[in-house]
Amino acid sequence: MTSQELRRKYIDFFVKKGHTEIPSASLVPENDPSTLFISAGMQPIASFLMGEKHPSGNKLVNSQKCIRTDDIDEVGDKFHHTFFEMLGHWSLGDYWKKQAIKMSWEFSTQELGLDKNKLAVTVFEGNVNASKDEESIQVWKSLGFPEQRIIKLNKKENWWEPAGESGPCGPDTEMFYWTDNKNPAPEKFNPEDSRWFEIGNDVLMQYNKIAKNKYIPAKQKNIDNGTGFERVVAVTNNLDDNYLTDLFLPIIKKIEELSEKNYKNVSEEIKKSIRIIADHLRAATFILADNTKIIPSNTDQGYVIRKLIRRAIRHGRMIGIKENFTRKIAEVVINLMSEIYPELEKNKKFVLDNFELEEEKFTKTLQQGLKKFQKLEIRNQKLGQKKISGAEVFDLFQTYGFPIELTKELASEKGLEVDEKGFEKEMKKHQELSRTATAGKFKGGLANQSEQTIKYHTTAHLMLAALRKVLNENIQQKGSNINEERLRFDFSYSEKMTDEQKAEVENLVNNWIKQDLKIICEEMSLDEAKKQGATGAFENKYGEKVKVFTIGSSFAKATADRENNNIVSKEICGGPHIKRTGNLGKFKIKKEQSSSAGIRRIKAVLE
């Protein structure tokens, strides 16, 4: 079964079960400062899991683009990926455990034809905060699962917790498949055996976390299914290596051509490098192709792109690719995936130009690293030292992109040794710092929808309306980052704002706040919203039915109010928002600066 057939089969199956297909959201979160990228299918619909009404109904399905960077150093095995697709379906307060588990079982065994005798599951064993998930156990038994194929695990393994201080949560039940084609599946399921492959997970959101170790029953019980697309494609084709599926094979073949290496007939170390190149350049291609137009840099998402590209280049050099090659791999990814994700073809020039520029920059950095190594060599000769310290080896790696293998090779040619243990120590320190920094990004979490945060969501609409009046009516939102303390807002404009312009924007927003305008939410088709003049930077996120927030009037009074200039803002948005502008407080711009070429950034507060 091809990947395209499987993706379509999953979505069509759940559409037949009453779900509505929604499009994949952008890889960059909208109004969520807690994380750099969308890392799970549920993330873009977090507010709806918390009770907001979704315009497409209470049963949804899609394939969501995701980026995960927390285990980027583990990429290189057969199944870890930085970019991946998460097949997902959701019940927002509709069906519950029995129906959810039965659908997962039916899809796996009947639609995909997976061998029932190779399936096993895990469930939550219970703790002081929540009882054992007996309901799921009984459902699995009713489907024919014997006791020894149902394993009860602890909170660490079978519980989904929100990243922040509060939010919906609950036990999960995971489905595993036996991937060893040479040996039959053992009667007893051992989740520690790597030949058991997790293929899907039903999160059963029946609690709300209100504080650390404090939970209450949820008013709205949700089902959040996540099915690893790449893994399921491999399993259904009897492959134990995701990189041999049609999602990766054309990329692997291009790397083979460039390196003159055969993926199937090389050492595991070279295979690892080939996988890293394929994974990292695939991920970087998707991030660059995202309509948010992020470029390689030294901060946030741009830093991730830079790290992915440079790590891929290092591994390319290690396996013998001497020419600039990242652009060529990106072209393969675009040709392979653009039918499903049209933004790849739409933004092709932007993607390829940035690959080319970043590779040229990094090549120069590598040359600087060679000069640095030569200085170390001369110094060691003068001092009579035969070993390059771990800190120096790490500096070559971190600053100049030198993999330790390259440093060892150069050192060997000069009769020098490398302090590998010291290097590993420095690397562990660096990784720990990176993890700490990444964890900091999750402060607040996906469920951070406090009253103040919601006020800032509404303020963003007022500010955009004011910017259009003061600067240019065609200004578009290019991103935002909202927390309880401030609003950060990116918009399309190439010139620095004057003090007078900033003051005018502040005055407009504060006047609208003083007028205590109504904020009306209406649901309609996307076409109808556009006909009515509604705008939205993220309109492709919600599918055919959308929510339109009008500040100042509803569409029912649109004609009269437009004539009287009573409509301030009319935008497609997922919410949440307050009911009246008079509850916002005083608006103040704290800073206005450049974000990137043609993009300005405002940081503002409510006092």
Image (cartoon, rainbow, N blue to C red):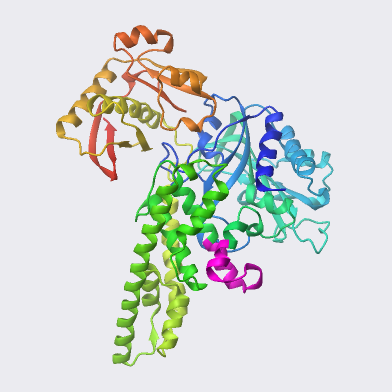
At x 42% / y 59%, what residue is drawn? 307
Instruction: Reply yes or no: does residue 186 show up in magenta.
Output: no
Instruction: Reply yes or no: does residue 260 show up in magenta.
Output: yes
The image shows residue 194 at horizontal and vertical percentages of: 69, 61
Residue 573 visible (yes or no)? yes
- In the displayed orientation, state which residue is furthest to the top: 560
**In the picture shown, does residue 362 fall above or below 523?**
below
**In the picture shown, does residue 528 fall above or below 195?**
above
**In the picture shown, does residue 492 fall above or below 268?**
above
Q: Nearer the viewer, residue 368 or 449?
A: 368
Q: Quadrant of residue 374?
A: bottom left
The image shows residue 253 at horizontal and vertical percentages of: 60, 62
At x 31% / y 12%, what residue is drawn? 566
What's drawn in magenta, residue-wise?
A: 254-277
The image shows residue 414 at horizontal and vertical percentages of: 40, 89
- In the displayed orientation, state which residue is furthest to the bottom: 384
Say left or right for 285 vs 196. left
Residue 79 visible (yes or no)? no
